Amino acid sequence: MDHNFAKEKVADTVSSYKITRIREDFPILSTMVHGRDLVYLDNASSAQKPRQVIDRITEAYTMSYSNVHRGLHFMSEKATEDYESARDSVRAFLGASSNAEIIFTRNATEAINLVASSWGRTNLRVGDEVLITYMEHHSNIVPWQMLRDEKGFVLKALKPKKDGTFDVDSFKTLLTDRTKLVSVCHVSNVLGTVVPVFEVTKLAHDVGALVLLDGSQAVPHISVDVQNIGCDFYCFTGHKLYGPSGIGVLYGKENVLEAMPPYQGGGNMISSVSIEMSKWADLPSKFESGTPAIVQAIGLAAAIDYMNDIGLDSIAKYEQELLNYATRMLDLVEGLTIIGRAYDKGPIATFVLDCVHPHDIAMIIDQQGVAVRAGNHCAQPLMDLYKVSATTRASFAMYNTFEEIDMFVDALKVVRRMFA
Ligand SMILES: *Cc1c(COP(=O)(O)O)cnc(C)c1O
């Protein structure tokens, strides 16, 4: 009954959405797991790849592979062109004004470490403050702790409201004229909370702080325009955006990046080298030392093209319907508590189930082919805040279906009965 009712309600959004065609684009979705259809609900850990991305990677290795930026031969020129054209796709995707502002990194973690090591080490000192939140991924906590121990600034963390909402009032009280950097996620990987990044950026700029946004969980679900937001840095990781692993992006405002020293030294990031000294290359090469993840960048651009073909707004609307439906269904499971109920949420449902350890849940429903994440989600401070050691997380992507949510919730009910 509930199922049909929900189906009717979402009919408009869903009927125009080409879910069958989209699912056919993702070869892994037709795999069987333990003799069951794979129900992949671990997208916030890493998303699956469409054939268009896999084919583009194969094509790059088959037709136009070489190192970039150095050869004077056909293949090198072709590979360089493809790599730089991938940068152009990312620039357009983020709404940045220039390709000089797009740095390819290994992942989001490396992007944040780049900012900490380069901008942070140059600009932060005793008396300064860096403001993060309790809902950061470890990758936006640990680099700041390491630098704090070296530099002696103060690292502050904002708590979310009990329901997971970003607390703007507390944020205002934590901001001071000593705050030099606000580094927060755009969307929480545990609570799903969408941070009001426009307001956060404006308030931070009012006290003279720079703003770094970790968009790892935002870009797969929300269309982003960094110029509109006004943030100084924005980063994300490719493998959560239907692209390959080993590639991430750091956006930085050109004048900010220009003033920063290199992160790592080596080839490609220099304009000249003698034994006595070296001169740095222009942006973005200054921050891309060594041979980059050439084909991964090209694959990432193919993922962006793929998303644009489907339409970022269609994906966002469809995923919101999935989230609403999953939330309603999970609320009907006895003993289940959802953690994170912000009004504005990405498609992530994190929960605990009375008397059942999250690891048991994940292992038992895996037998039904359902893949979810159980653990601390690289967010131990948040687990401590909510007084849980671990949670189970189902996270949705453009290719998930309402039927899959039914299978997942049915599997949960079986777990519930086993332990009741
Ligand atoms: C996954 C994730 C990261 C880290 O991504 P890596 O690919 O491991 O570098 C950072 N922040 C958030 C919010 C994430 O979800």
Image (cartoon, helix red, strand yellow):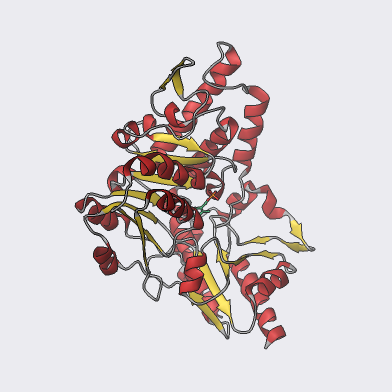
The answer to whether one can see residue 322 in this image is: no
Whether residue 252 is situated above or below residue 100 in the rendered picture:
below
Q: Residue furthest bottom?
A: 420
The answer to whether one can see residue 167 in this image is: yes
Image location of residue 330, percent across then percent down: 55, 77
Whether residue 65 is situated above or below residue 21 in the rendered picture:
above
Q: Is residue 404 left or right of residue 229?
A: right
Q: Give whichever of 99, 138 is nearer the camera.
A: 138
Q: Residue furthest top?
A: 72
Image location of residue 348, percent across then percent down: 50, 64
Question: Quadrant of the rendered structure where residue 3 is?
Answer: bottom right
Q: Give whichever of 351, 153 is nearer the camera.
A: 153
Q: Give whichever of 85, 282 is nearer the camera.
A: 282
**Residue for point 46% across, 45% down:** 113
Image location of residue 190, percent across then percent down: 50, 65
Quarter holding the C terminus is: bottom right
Number of dots carrying numbers: 0
Whether residue 68 is situated above or below residue 101 in the rendered picture:
above
Q: Is residue 65 left or right of residue 343?
A: right
Whether residue 113 is situated above or below residue 403 in the rendered picture:
above
Q: Residue furthest right?
A: 35
**Residue for point 55% across, 22% down:** 68
Image location of residue 248, percent across then percent down: 51, 42
Quarter holding the N terminus is: bottom right
**Residue for point 66% across, 28% down:** 61
